[in-house]
Amino acid sequence: MSARVVSGVVGVTFALVTAIVGVGQGAPPRFLLLDTTLGLTFVAAGVLAWRRRPDVPTGAALTLCGVLWFVGSYAPTGVGWMAALGFSFERYYDPVLAWLVLSFPGRRLEGVARTTVAVVAGSYVVRSLTRLLVYDPPLLNPDGCAGCPSNPFAVAPNAGLLEAVETVTGTAIVAGFAVVLGLLILRWRAASSPSRRILRPVLSGGALAAVAAGYQAANLVVEVTAGRPLITLGPPWQEVEAWLLFGARVLVPIGIAWGVFRLRAPHGPAARLAVEFSDDRGPLRIETALRQALADPTIEVLRWDTDGQHWTDERGDRAPPPMQTDGRSVLMLERRGNPVAAVVHDAMLVEDPGLMASVGAVLRLSIDNDRLSAQVQRQLAEVHASRARILAAADEERRRIERDLHDGTQHRLLGLSMRLQDVRLHARAAGAPDLLFEELDAVAAELRETMREIRELARGIHPAVLTNEGLEPAVRTLARRCTVPVELRTELNGRLPAAVETAAYYVVAEGLANVARHSRATQSRVRLALADGVLVIEVGDDGVGGASEGAGSGLRGLSDRVVALDGALSVTSPPTGGTWLRAEIPRR
């Protein structure tokens, strides 16, 4: 059986025994019900806190408070040894509560706090031993306690010593709880938002308990020294006052149970973070989402720059290494032993390691997604750049071939044609037969046809008019050569980048070629327009339709060329409604 279960059983046993003794002594049922309920509240809160946080002694201390609560309940009994022990060791839960509220949720007491708790606890011990050894009610107070049971533990009854000890220890207890109250106020003022979220019920309950304990100790000192209470109340109000003072103590276990529950509750913040991180809202979204989900506006997210070997903040600026300081903790995220990121946060969040583990897992996924997304974007940029370079190289090669055909092959053929004319003239002068002239004419006609085909080939490879005069004149040339009438509309203003003009030219060329070959159209339309930095090219007809973007290598090649320039190509071609080819290319 675990220590937690044993402590709970002990607490319940004390409650049952106290109730049985109370019934046997004729205690009022209302007193027994309230007293047992308040004591069991400590026990229940202790068992819950112990189960939720077995790594800290909070639960055990609360359960101990429940047991100590019932010790004082034996003071009014008529059994001598029970009454003596109950009176001597009553309210020992107060120093335990002082330690609980000052150390929650698991801090180590130091300095003034530790000294204060030690003084209060020591005062209780001195008072208890004095009451146990020198106080005998029938001897020291024969007039006010004639029917009280005798104290079997009293070895040297002494009223003067008892009063002196009660006064000194009571004063020390009052001062101690005043200091406890001040420490609680200072801790609240210094607490961050996440700390206040957890500490609010504990510190508020602890403050009321400190006031109640201090008031009761001060009231006892005044009664001992002046023979009267601090505030004189009638019988009904005396009972109300007593239960209010006792009830103030019970706010502490309730507050601690609530605080522990908040610490160990299902991790809704981690789920909210997963939703937040799925919405890409910029480089600062992780830090902002963490601050909102964990209610800690001081959270900082740092990332490790593997290239520069230093830390950067969410803005990308260089940052100092994350350091754990008083009140601040660091959640370090690593991959294969190497740092990836760090979260600098309020130390209170460490009290729930499960929460930070969940947050770390979600954060690691988000950072990995960002890293993969950035890697994909870099690869896409490299692919776009590579495609653009390939197209540029292909266009340059087209221009080179066009120049070679124009400046080399065409010129040589032109030279051959001129030599053939010279041969014809010399042959005529020499009186050559007519058959020779017929052969020479046939060769000249073949040369002219070859030169025409080479010009057409060169124009198809890369039109010189596009390079020399621009997109609009080149498209007008295409329109004039098309076998289907073309209605041309242009809304351009000057030249465009060479890559954009080349892509637009081939879109129009392929579109008009398809109109002539496949559409059986009677009219074609071409529109070039520049709007908001985007060149829009449209080629349409009134033909039979039914074309698709994926049909044929020509449109696929066009799509690759346009996409390489961050553009888009689409084909609209219902079966009976003509065909529209549309391309949009950003002007870069």
Image (cartoon, helix red, strand yellow):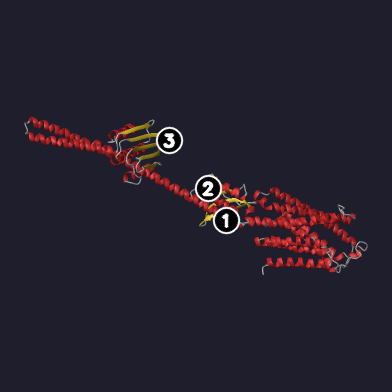
Q: Where residue 462 appears, x then y in whole percent?
A: 29, 38
Residue 358 is marked as 1
Mark 3 vs 2: CB contact within 8 A: no
Q: Where residue 164 appears, x then y in whole percent?
A: 87, 58
Mark 3 surroundings within 10 Å by alpha-carbon count, few (fewer than 14), some (14 through 19), many (20 or more): few
Q: Where residue 511 appears, x then y in whole percent?
A: 33, 39
| Residue at x 10%, y 34% (from the top left corner) | 437
Residue 210 seen by the camera: yes
Q: Of callouts 1 and 2, which one flags the residue occurring earlier in the amino acid sequence? A: 2
Mark 1 vs 2: CB contact within 8 A: no
Q: Where residue 101 appears, x then y in whole percent?
A: 72, 55
Q: Quadrant of residue 44?
A: bottom right
Q: Is residue 372 above or below residue 444?
A: below
Residue 89 seen by the camera: no
Q: Is residue 387 above or below residue 66?
A: above
Q: Amino acid at mark 3?
A: Gly
Report helix, strand or loop for mark 1.
Answer: helix
Q: Amino acid at mark 2?
A: Asp
Q: Amino acid at mark 1?
A: Ser
Give the CA distance from mark 3 to mark 1: 47 Å
Q: Which quadrant is the N terminus positioned in?
A: bottom right
135, 319: nearer the viewer: 135
Q: Of callouts 3 and 2, which one flags the residue occurring earlier in the amino acid sequence? A: 2
Which residue bears the numbered disc 3? 533
Residue, far top: 429
Report helix, strand or loop for mark 2.
Answer: loop
| Residue at x 66%, y 62% (from the top left corner) | 51
62, 545: nearer the viewer: 545
Residue 279 is marked as 2
